Amino acid sequence: MGEEVGILCHLTSLPGGQISDGEEFIQYLKANNYTKWQFLPLTPPDKHNSPYASPSAFAGNFRLCSGEGVGDLSTEAYWLDDWAVFATITEHFPGKNWTEWPKELRDREPEAIANWRKKVNPEITRQGIFQHEWLAMKSLANEHGIELIGDLPIFVSHHSADVWANPKLFQLDENGLPAVVAGVPPDYFSETGQKWNTVLYNWAEHERTGWRWWRERMARMLRLFDIVRIDHFRGFHSAWAVPREAENGIIGEWQEGPKAALIQQLIDIAGDESRIIAEDLGIIPQEVIDLRLKFNLQGMAILQFGFGTDNQESPHNPNNINDMQVVYTGTHDNDTLLGWWQSAGDDIKTNVRSVIGDSDDVIGSLIEVAKDCAAPLCIIPLQDILRLDTSGRMNIPGIEKGNWQWQFEWKDLNL
């Protein structure tokens, strides 16, 4: 039996979509003996509501807030001023990328920025409200024996305070635009790969600065969460660079990443490798697995991937899942378990039946399989607990519109 079971449910999926809904959800988690609550990123989303292409790697999404109390931001000095100025200018030039701002703002000329810095108090207050409300909820969760798992997207949006304020840390051309963007080649998530339009890093500059941006980012995450899932961990080993003008992720090339040098920095900040989960899904070379294991980091296993034609060899097959993995029935990028089962071919269904037998409750049986495998932690999307079909899906990778919208109602939990 897995030692612990947690729930994956983004904050926007709660009935009101706000931090204030968290108290009631924590009561549900505690009553059902769930000890972990995993979120998607809590940074401001992009125009399509994706939390994975945020204009900040650090700021909180104020739209999640409903209170008025303002928290202490003294530990947030590294990023707060840049974000507040960037957000304030962005409001003044809606729909424009920072490269389209007036030259003095685009290039951060001190006198021009000083004038805008006089206008940032509303955004500073918004971040203080987020800080206060979020940490109060985290404290309540921890008091009830529930740890919060945050999500750290490896890449950031080009139109972000981070890229604008630290252009040397990113691969930009003379006009401030990315020559190539991040993505992944074709894999089991998408036949045409994925083009994320997020910026790739200038790793040499990060190293020259002592990795400060990354150290500050991990420290911020661990002030907000107990555990951090690093999304697309393989990007520390190598990243798929896609031409900016490409239509999809088919054409690209692998760029070498910083590997152990950066991972050691992040573990130093965390203080304990058990506070990090490395998302190692997709087409993963053995060197990436070896790199993860070198640092004693847990990877991820997805039950839905464990019953295909290669099921006997698959690291996602329940018989092959080990104690260096966290097992999930699915992620925010998968169909729901029921949706997956309803669309599965005969071969997959035969492989599933060979494990669960002739169960009348296939979804419940698969959840029990996940709980019973060797992984010390099992995370189940709330949609699977609720036995929802594809209508409950959170995201379809590679599709910009129509995602990130699913919400439940309190009555669905049978409280």
Image: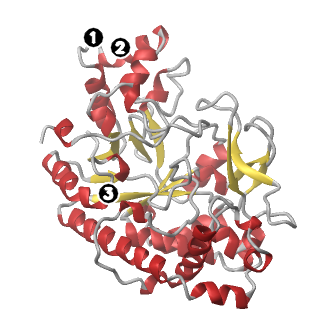
Residue drawn at point x = 56 percent, y = 41 percent: 281
* Mark identifier at residue 358: 1
Indicate the amino acid at tag 2. Arg
Q: Which residue was labeled with disc 3?
A: 18
Residue 215 to residue 19: above or below: below
Q: Is residue 305 left or right of residue 285?
A: left
In this view, the residue in front, 357 or 381, is 381
The kind of secondary structure element at disc 1 is: loop
Frontmost of labels 2 and 3 is: 3
2 or 3: tag closer to the N-terminus: 3
Give the label on residue 353, or none: 2
Q: Quadrant of the N terminus?
A: top left
Q: In the rendering, at what x and y percent does residue 17 appear?
A: 33, 52
The residue located at (57%, 74%) in the rendering is 88
Q: Residue at x 55, y 21 (%)?
A: 310
Measure how far apart labels 3 and 1 are at the Cα level. 41 Å
Of pointers 3 and 1, the one earlier in the residue sequence: 3
Q: Is residue 237 left or right of residue 30?
A: right
Count residues near mark 2 (Cα–Cα under 10 Å), then give few for <14, some for 14-19, many for 20+. Answer: some
Residue 342 placement, left or right of 175: left
Q: Which amino acid, by three-letter code, is at mark 3?
A: Gln
Under circle 3, the secondary element is loop
Q: Does any portion of residue 407 appear in the rendered image?
A: yes
Give the quadrant of residue 205: bottom right
Asked if 185 appears above or below 274 in the picture, the reply is: above
| Secondary structure of the residue carrying numbered label 2 | helix
Percent across and percent down for residue 107 are 77, 78
Farthest residue to the top: give it: 346
